[in-house]
């Protein structure tokens, strides 16, 4: 099936939980102590600006992490809280940080209760509703910073990246991560939307990305191109196996992810299922059912 696409992941970086790292004159980061196979070392909370500051993703519901954010901004005012998306490792701590600061919250909107991820850390935060709903291209300005909302559905339907105009960098949430590929899990996660959102970022000018998990990404256009190629390669793999008569998600995962860490098995199943949904929607496969993970999938020409 040819040589697989190699993505240059970066998994090494130094930090201490709860201790702010200065990433640039305008950016600090505090990492929550919630490591897992899906969050890597933990969720990074970004502090943007000085004096009156913005926080991007307060993280999981955790008093210790709230205290660390407040300690990192002692003597300053947290005036804005931005949410990239409403998964349980990104937005719930707003419940503690907002009343402690009086900050206004911003995000794309509430996570749909009928469209949440149902495994691991990806569970939807159904309680969060932003004070201000943002649309693609909206710009919010503070005294020392300005952030542009970039709607990037795919990992989650309400996912936003945020472009810091003063530094020409992008806070990429979980849409683009340097340590791993992104989990896309139907129905709220959508593979077609995810690939289109990656292509959308190729048209932008930011020169460095700061994901919430792991460290920075330089030369993001090169990196994104490899992510897109990887997703297309996965669908070629699926097509090849479907032609061989391998018709279930579980059997496809067994063929495509040999030696997989068992803790990542459910994520792999959800990713393959999301690819299959996209392939059915683009008339490259046929589903014998209602597009559920347990259904049987075949090449379009063998739909009978």
Image (cartoon, rainbow, N blue to C red):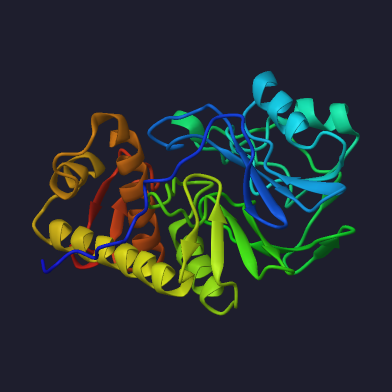
Q: Is residue 263 above or below residue 253?
A: above
Q: Would residue 180 be visible to someone looking at this image? A: yes
Total count of labels? 0
Residue 62 quadrant: top right
Residue 18 quadrant: top right
Q: Is residue 229 above or below residue 244?
A: below
Q: Would residue 304 be visible to someone looking at this image? A: no
* Residue that protrudes farthest toward the top in the picture: 63
Q: Quadrant of the C terminus?
A: bottom left
**Spot occupied by residue 266 in the image (x, y as percentages of width and height):** 33, 34
**Spot occupied by residue 52 in the image (x, y as percentages of width and height):** 88, 48
> 2 or 44, which lies in front?
44
| Left or right: where 117 falls relative to 239 | right
x 72%, y 42%: residue: 110
> 250 or 96, which lies in front?
96
**Spot occupied by residue 146 in the image (x, y as percentages of width and height):** 80, 63
Q: Quadrant of the N terminus?
A: bottom left
| Left or right: where 163 falls relative to 224 | right
x 46%, y 41%: residue: 14
Residue 170 quadrant: bottom right
| Left or right: where 94 falls relative to 40 | right
**Spot occupied by residue 299 in the image (x, y as percentages of width and height):** 21, 62
| Left or right: where 157 falls relative to 25 | left
x 63%, y 34%: residue: 59
> 131 or 225, which lies in front?
225
């Amino acid at each position: 099936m040819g040589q697989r696409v190699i993505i240059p992941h970066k998994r090494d970086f130094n930090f201490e939980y709860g201790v702010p790292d200065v990433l640039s004159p305008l950016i600090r980061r505090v990492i929550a102590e919630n490591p897992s196979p899906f969050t890597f070392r933990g969720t990074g909370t970004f502090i943007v600006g000085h004096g009156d500051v913005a926080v991007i993703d307060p993280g999981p519901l955790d008093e210790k992490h709230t205290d660390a954010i407040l300690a990192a901004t002692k003597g300053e005012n947290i005036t804005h809280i931005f949410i990239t998306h409403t998964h349980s490792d990104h937005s719930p701590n707003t419940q503690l940080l907002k009343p402690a600061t009086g900050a206004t919250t911003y995000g794309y909107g509430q996570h749909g209760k009928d469209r949440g991820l149902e495994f691991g850390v990806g569970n939807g935060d159904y309680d969060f509703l932003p004070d201000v709903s943002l649309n693609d291209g909206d710009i919010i300005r503070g005294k020392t910073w300005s952030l542009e909302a970039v709607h990037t559905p795919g990992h989650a339907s309400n996912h936003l990246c945020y472009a810091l105009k003063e530094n020409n960098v992008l806070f990429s949430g979980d849409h683009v991560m340097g340590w791993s590929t992104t989990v896309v899990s139907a129905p709220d996660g959508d593979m077609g939307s995810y690939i289109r959102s990656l292509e959308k970022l190729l048209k932008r000018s930011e020169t460095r990305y700061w994901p919430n998990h792991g460290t920075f990404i330089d030369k993001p256009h090169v990196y994104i191109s490899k992510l897109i190629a990887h997703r297309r390669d996965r669908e070629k793999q699926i097509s090849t196996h479907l032609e061989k008569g391998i018709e279930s998600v579980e059997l496809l995962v067994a063929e495509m992810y040999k030696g997989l860490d068992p803790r990542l098995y459910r994520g792999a199943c959800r990713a393959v299922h999301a690819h299959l949904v996209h392939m059915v929607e683009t008339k490259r496969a046929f589903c014998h059912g209602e597009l559920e993970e347990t259904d049987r999938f075949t090449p379009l020409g063998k739909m009978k």
